[in-house]
Structure formats: structure tokens, C-alpha cells
Image: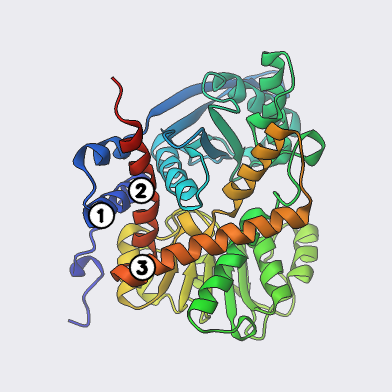
Amino acid sequence: MGNETPEDKGHAALDSAWETALAQLDEAAELMGLAPGVHEILRAPKRSLSVSVPFRLDDGSTKVCQGYRVHHNVTRGPAKGGIRYHQSVDLDEVKALAMWMTWKSAIAGIPFGGAKGGVAVDPKVLSRGELERMTRRYASEILPLIGPERDIPAPDMNTNEEIMAWIMDTYSINQGYSVPGVVTGKPVAIGGSKGRGGATSRGVMYMIFSTLKALGKGIDEVSVAIQGYGKVGGFAAQLLHDAGCRVVAVSDVEGGLYRERGLDPEAINRHKREAGAVAGFPGAEPISNSDLLEVDCDVLVPAAIEGVITVKNADKVKAEIVCEAANGPVTFEADKILGERGIFVVPDILANAGGVTVSYFEWVQDIQAYFWSEEEVNDRLRQIMERSFHEVYSLASEKELTMRQAAHWIGVGRVAEAHLTRGLFP
């Protein structure tokens, strides 16, 4: 019996993020007793667009990439979701991310539906001019879907506020006037919100603090390991360190670092700016990305890509708490293993909702042409994240569910209620 694999215990592996998203929805539907018709509606994206993205390279030749934009659901409001540039982007991944955005917005009580987009490209091999031409062509191809009352893109993996500015400009030129509300996560100079850049990281911090409070732990007693030292993971490390947590391990795509007595994110940031990676930072033990997931710590924060905790390594995770800063970092079957082991998992659709929450704030400010201070943004973010955590935690405790099951129950339930309230046309 001691040699059983996770698969032997009935955890059949799922191959993709889309299969994981569907399995999570199906489980929630069964737990809730969701009406079969509504369940079927929610299993299928409302619309999926695949586009060819030809653009000119600096040498005059033409490159063609595949792009996508998916609206999973728009019953509660305009579609909302990021755009990612990565060579592995495909339609199934984008569909899964769009579905998770639907639940994420609903859990936070934000009047958005779920969307996602992406281009299958490695942006690191493109010059700035090539990146701009590709972005503007992609924006032109998805113009029929986007708009401040239809679908509002935002930054995601390998995209940033400059790319959002190019998309806003492309859309505005086609409209004949400036439309700042068509994207969020853009520069403050053209209608962006203060506090948006670090919103996902700050939301993760608020979620960890809420979890620690619920479990009766002090902030300064906690050790944290963070996989993914990019926009989200890097700033989360700084925030948690400044708050008194001991950040014992961090990593990026090139590898990672471990030091039991703690790392200084500011020093690591300086090293990364000079060396291009966290690897090689002096005074720390080098570790791999996979090793980081198995570090002995109190809180593990997967902040990189989906599917990093699987049936192959779920039984090796030593953290007491896993807070999903990335989308889908734990597979469906691995989540079951973590639950069986008593590990407290804060799911992505709850943990990383800080980004969409402040995107909502930005959209509201653009529509009103009235902007808030950073203190107002951060305080309103904290209120929403804390309220969302307590709603999910209370339901999980009441019905003896995992946090993921409870989060889906609330998110799916709110979208289902909107469908039943609006009715089916015709």
C-alpha cells in the first residue's frame, strides 16, 4: 500500500487547463445541485475568436502568429480578462482562463463577465517595434469583440501597460476619439489607475493575511516561498517581506534561491536588474523551480504558470498553506491530494482577484473621468479581498467544503442566478 501512486488512488490525470476548469465546474455543479440547463450553458464559452496575426519584422519580412480572444460569459456585465503573449498559448488555455475570470469577477462581486486573450509568440525574440506592430495588428483583428461596454482587455503574462496603451490607441483611432475605458492596466497618463500595477500582488498579500488570521497564525511567524519572480511574485515578495514575513525562497524561469533565515527582495531586485535573473544571487543556495515547490515553509505561493503542482509532486509539498497567485497552478487531481493531506489551498479565483478588482476601479474611474488616490484604491481593494475571503471561508466551514469548492459554489452560483434572473432568449 505504501507504494501506491496518486493515480492508483483514483486521481486520473487531466491533460489541460481547460479539462481542469471543466472538472472544477462539474464538481461545483454537482455539489450545488445546479440546474442541468444552466450547467450546460456555463460549460461552453459564449464566443471564441481565432485570428491570424501577420506583422512586419524589422528586416522587412512578414511573420504570422495565431491569436485568440474568448468570451466565456457576459451575463453579469462586460467581458473582462487579460492578454498574454507566450509561445504555448492555445485555444484551450485561453478558454480555461476566460472561465476562471468569470468566477473570479463573480466572487469579488464585480459586474464583469469572463474573457481572455493571447498570441502564440515568444515576445522576447521581438524588437520593441516588432512587438508594437504585432500588438496593433492583433488589436485590429479582435476589434469586433472589444469595447468599454463589451470586453475590456488587461495585461497578463508578458504584456504590460505599454502594450495596453497601444491597444487603446488602436481602438481609439478606429473610433475617431479617445476611449480610455477599452483597456485597463494602462499608464496613469492616459487614464490608468494609481495602484493598478501592484494590485494582484497586494491582493495576494491581503489573502495570505486573512488566511493566517483565520488559522490563528501571526504574520511575523511565517516563512514564504514564491515560485515566479515576475510582476506578481516579485512585488508580492517585497510586500510580504516588508510586512514581517520571512521570504525563504524565490525563483524565476532561470532557477531559484533558498536561504532559511530569509532573503532580501530589494537586494534580489538589484541583482536581477544587473544579471537578468535571480540565479547567482550571493549568499543563497541555488534551487530549481521544481525544488522550490517542495521547500519546507509555511506558505507556498505559485506565481508563475499553470499546472506546476501535479500528481507527481503534490505529495512532496511541505507548505501548510498554498496561495495560488498564478492561474491554475494546481491541477484538479493534485488539488485532491493536497486536500487529503490537510494543506489549506487558497484558490486562484479568490487569491489573485486583486488585479481584476483594481481593473474594475480603473474602468469606473475612466467612465466617470474622476480619479482616486492610491490610498483609496488600496483600501477599497483590501475591503473587497477580505470580504471575499470571509464569504468563501464561512461557506467552506459551514458546508465542510474545501476553499476551492466553496469559491466555485459562490462564483458559479452568482452567475447561475444572473442567468435564471435574465431568462433565456428567445
Horizontal side of residue 204 vs 93, given as left or right? right
Place of residue 140 in the rendered image (x, y in percent of width and height, measured from the top left): 60, 19
Between 160 and 107, the one nearer to me in the picture: 107
Residue type (three-letter) at the residue carrying disc 1: Met
Total numbered badges shown on the rendered structure = 3
Give the answer, above or below, for where 61 lies relative to 215.
Answer: above
Which residue is the site of mark 2?
Answer: 412
Mark 2 and mark 1 residues within 8 Å of each other at the beta carbon: yes
Which residue is the site of mark 1?
Answer: 32
Residue found 74% across the figure and 40% down from its top: 192
Query: Which badge, 2 or 3, comes first in the chain's sequence?
Result: 3
Query: Please, what secondary structure does the residue beneath circle 2 have?
Result: helix
Mark 2 and mark 3 residues within 8 Å of each other at the beta carbon: no
Number of the label disc, if any, that sits on residue 396: 3
Place of residue 217 in the rendered image (x, y in percent of width and height, measured from the top left): 54, 84
Place of residue 375 in the rendered image (x, y in percent of width and height, measured from the top left): 76, 57
Query: Please, what secondary structure does the residue beneath circle 1 have?
Result: helix
Residue 232 in view = no
